[in-house]
Image: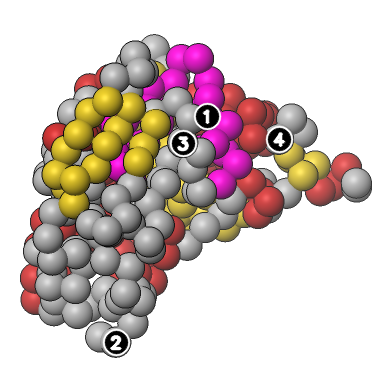
Amino acid sequence: MSANNRVSKETILHDLRQLGVQSGMELLVHSSLSRIGYVEGGADTVIDALLKAVDPAEGTLLVPTLTGTSADSAEQPPFFDVKASQCWTGVIPETMRLREDAVRSLSPTHSVAAIGRNAFDLTRGHEDCWTTCGFGSPYYRLCRRRGAILLLGVTLESNTTFHTVEEVVGVPYHLQPKPVTCTMTDEQGRSIVRSTMLHDWGTPRNFSVLEAPLLAEGIMKAGRIGHADCFLIDAESFLAYSTDQLQSNPRLLTAQS
């Protein structure tokens, strides 16, 4: 591996600062490790750099640890174990959720893991949300707490908070028609049963339709971390702007809009 292709913790931290990540931020990160380049130490190095950037004594780092699939339904309800259920959102989230100081929310499909000062406040009560990304979820709370979203080597198509927008607006295509009874196991091994509205996977999305407007409005900033193209998004402004746009055109975020 050429020295020019290697990416160190110091390089990642420098690039995070250049992009605008600051100490004290509450930061939700969607990521692709391979896009960054050859990172010395792998996913743990990226996590360490992100934690250094937000400073867990003052800020909080969050990652999506999603487990939901298109098969989830009333006939096949999802089962979630906060300790054992692996996520499909990449090696960085999967590595972070296993850290001893990580707090993972209880959600049958759309959990998040968090480390830092407000990890508990951001993740608590996720199991009680009527929709998995909507009111009261970590995604919604992050927006209301003036947090930020970092797309690290991924595009807007990976931005789960678009589902928050869809759930706030109440678009007709997004959720299954009836609530599903789901079972979750918490840190103490207790079973928690909740009825929740689950996602309907049948409608293709086009979240990137808002890339140019979000950049033009100053809600989103483009940059690079290592070799990865990145976006840093002001979560509160993102929710407000995207909600307004979707209310005006309820099919805006679908591939058939």
- Identify residue for label 2: 256
Q: Residue at x 39, y 31 (%)?
A: 81
Discs 1/3, front: 3
Q: How far apart are marks 1 and 2 (CA)?
A: 36 Å
Q: Above or below — where is 204 with respect to 135?
A: below
Instruction: Tell me where the magenta segment starts and ends, as one range.
Output: 90-114
Question: Residue 85, labelled with which disc?
Answer: 3
Circle 4: residue type: Gly
Q: Above or below — where is 151 with respect to 102?
A: below
Circle 3: residue type: Ser
Circle 2: residue type: Gln
Residue projecting furthest to the right: 2
Magenta segment includes 186: no
Q: Which of 233 and 192 is in front in this view?
A: 192
Residue 172 visible (yes or no) = yes
- Residue 119: where, in percent of width, then height? 32, 22
Instruction: Please tell me which of labels 1 and 2 falls first in the chain.
Output: 1
Circle 1: residue type: Met
Instruction: Please tell me which of labels 2 and 4 falls first in the chain.
Output: 4
Circle 4 SS class: loop
Question: Residue 42, labelled with which disc?
Answer: 4
Q: Do the residues labelled 3 and 4 touch (CB within 8 Å)?
A: no
Magenta segment includes 107: yes
- Residue 52: where, in percent of width, then height? 52, 22
- Identify residue for label 1: 96
Q: Distance between the residues labelled 1 and 4?
A: 12 Å
